[in-house]
Image (cartoon, helix red, strand yellow):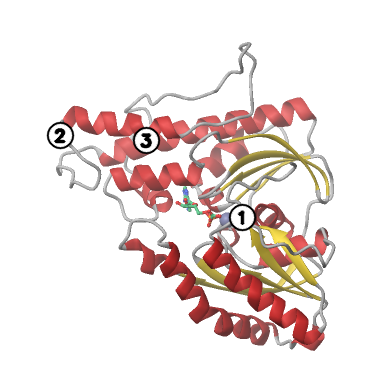
């Protein structure tokens, strides 16, 4: 049994996981309401909220699992990437618990956590290689997993992450933060073919296909569409009631999903992977889940909705399946960490 702790962004989370698959407790204190008024995450507010919440959240995770530190085999914590002022709260809590109890401390990469959200299952994956798409607010990475801890990076975003694009376009369309779920909801009444947003396939220098992504241009295209109707529109201005928000949201979502699915499915063909895994906050997206499941030539796994966003169960699972050197904790504030490099 491993206690996981996650505070990389705006969720204060702790969980107890048994044998890397069974969740005994999974506590997530979301700060989304605190940040909604700013239309994005306010790092100082996040850090303070983590400080207030970390102790009760860990306490609830232990009590919820019916265990004490003496029952555990280790403490796992997200060491990056993330907001430095947020990460440091979880790291110090985990270090203190490990030092005080003599338990080993596992330092986990947040992206690796998302990968291992797919192992929290009665029927965990058994066969490699696996093509894994990690799509969150901070990252869009396409990886080939050869084994536990053996990651090869196929490609990733060159600019905005997929979730970041959802959040920015949501804000442009006047939808509540975070943009991802809001755009999904708005899309339900919209026509995905209303606006033909570009599909950015990003060929290489010699016209070859790549596994990279670019989403920042889409946001500019959305702004251009808005300005066709409202010429002097500035971000955060209210849109006229007649503006086709649902069509715009559905068309934007379709453009993002088509490229994510197209590249992931091609990677599956070209690598001979046995399974496709999709994880991270954007893997909650219904259009993405539906498209990848129907177009993939091999089995697809997506996490249950409760494990798509940030949580600590995935951090504990990563520690179980890919135990690191317990002395590997090095607090590193780089925000562009990539797996496989
Ligand atoms: O994994 P996550 O909780 O945090 C990071 O590690 O970044 O991902 C958060 C991101 C946000 O950008 C949010 O808008 C997006 O996931 N998201 C969605 C959906 N639910 C959350 N994007 C599209 N559709 C959704 N249903
Ligand atoms: Zn995340």
Secondary structure of the residue carrying tag 3 is helix
Confirm or reject: label 3 Cβ below 8 Å from ligand 1.
no
Secondary structure of the residue carrying tag 1 is loop
- Which residue is painted at 81% across and 39% down in the image? 129
Q: Position of residue 128 (x, y in %)?
A: 83, 43
- Which residue is painted at 37% across and 37% down in the image? 250
Q: Earlier in the sequence, mark 3 or mark 2?
A: 3
Confirm or reject: label 1 Cβ below 8 Å from ligand 1.
no
In the figure, is residue 191 to the left or right of 11? left
Q: Earlier in the sequence, mark 2 or mark 1?
A: 1
Q: Position of residue 201 (x, y in %)?
A: 54, 23
Q: Which mark is residue 232?
A: 2
Q: Nearer the viewer, residue 98 or 137?
A: 98
Badge 1: residue crowd in 10 Å (few <14, some 14–19, many ≥20): many
Q: Quadrant of residue 27?
A: bottom right
Compared with residue 62, is residue 146 higher up or lower down, i.e. above or below?
above
Secondary structure of the residue carrying tag 2 is loop
Badge 3: residue crowd in 10 Å (few <14, some 14–19, many ≥20): many
Q: Position of residue 101 (x, y in %)?
A: 79, 86
Q: Quadrant of the N terminus?
A: bottom right
Compared with residue 49, is residue 67 higher up or lower down, i.e. above or below?
below
Q: How many marks can you see? A: 3
Q: Is residue 120 visible?
A: no
Q: CA distance from mark 3 to mark 2?
A: 17 Å
Q: Are marks 2 and 1 in contact (CB under 8 Å)?
A: no
Q: Quadrant of the C terminus?
A: top right
Q: Which residue is mark 1?
A: 81
Q: CA distance from mark 2 to mark 1?
A: 38 Å
Q: Quadrant of residue 248?
A: top left
Compared with residue 329, is residue 50 higher up or lower down, i.e. above or below?
below
Q: Which mark is residue 219?
A: 3
Q: Position of residue 328 (x, y in %)?
A: 79, 62
């Amino acid at each position: 049994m491993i206690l996981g702790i996650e505070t990389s962004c705006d969720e204060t989370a702790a969980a107890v996981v048994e044998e890397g698959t069974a969740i005994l407790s999974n506590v997530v204190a979301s700060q989304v309401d605190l940040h909604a008024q700013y239309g994005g995450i306010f790092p100082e507010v996040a850090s303070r909220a983590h400080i207030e919440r970390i102790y009760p959240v860990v306490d609830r995770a232990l009590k919820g699992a019916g265990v004490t530190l003496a029952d555990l085999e280790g403490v796992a914590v997200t060491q990056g990437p993330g907001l430095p002022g947020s990460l440091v709260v979880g790291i110090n809590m985990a270090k203190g618990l490990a030092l005080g109890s003599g338990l080993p401390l596992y330092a986990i990469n947040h992206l690796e956590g998302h990968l291992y959200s797919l192992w929290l299952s009665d029927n965990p994956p058994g066969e490699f290689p696996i093509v894994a798409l990690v799509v969150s607010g901070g990252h869009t990475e396409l990886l080939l997993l050869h084994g536990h801890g053996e990651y090869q990076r196929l490609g990733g975003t060159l600019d905005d992450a997929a979730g970041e694009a959802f959040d920015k376009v949501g804000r442009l369309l006047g939808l509540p933060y975070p943009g991802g779920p809001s755009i999904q909801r708005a899309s339900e009444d919209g026509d995905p073919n209303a606006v033909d947003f570009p599909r950015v396939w990003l060929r290489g220098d010699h016209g070859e296909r790549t596994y990279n992504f670019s989403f920042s241009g889409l946001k500019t295209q959305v702004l251009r569409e808005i300005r066709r109707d409202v010429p002097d529109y500035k971000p955060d201005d209210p849109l006229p009631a007649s503006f086709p928000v649902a069509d715009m949201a559905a068309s934007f979502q379709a453009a993002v999903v088509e490229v994510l699915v197209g590249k992931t499915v091609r990677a599956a063909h070209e690598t001979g992977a046995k399974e496709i895994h999709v994880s991270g906050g954007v893997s909650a997206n219904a259009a993405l889940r539906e498209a990848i499941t129907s177009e993939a030539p091999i089995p697809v796994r997506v996490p249950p909705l409760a494990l798509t966003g940030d949580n600590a169960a995935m951090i504990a699972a990563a520690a179980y399946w890919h135990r690191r050197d317990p002395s590997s904790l090095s607090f590193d504030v780089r925000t562009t960490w990539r797996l496989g490099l």
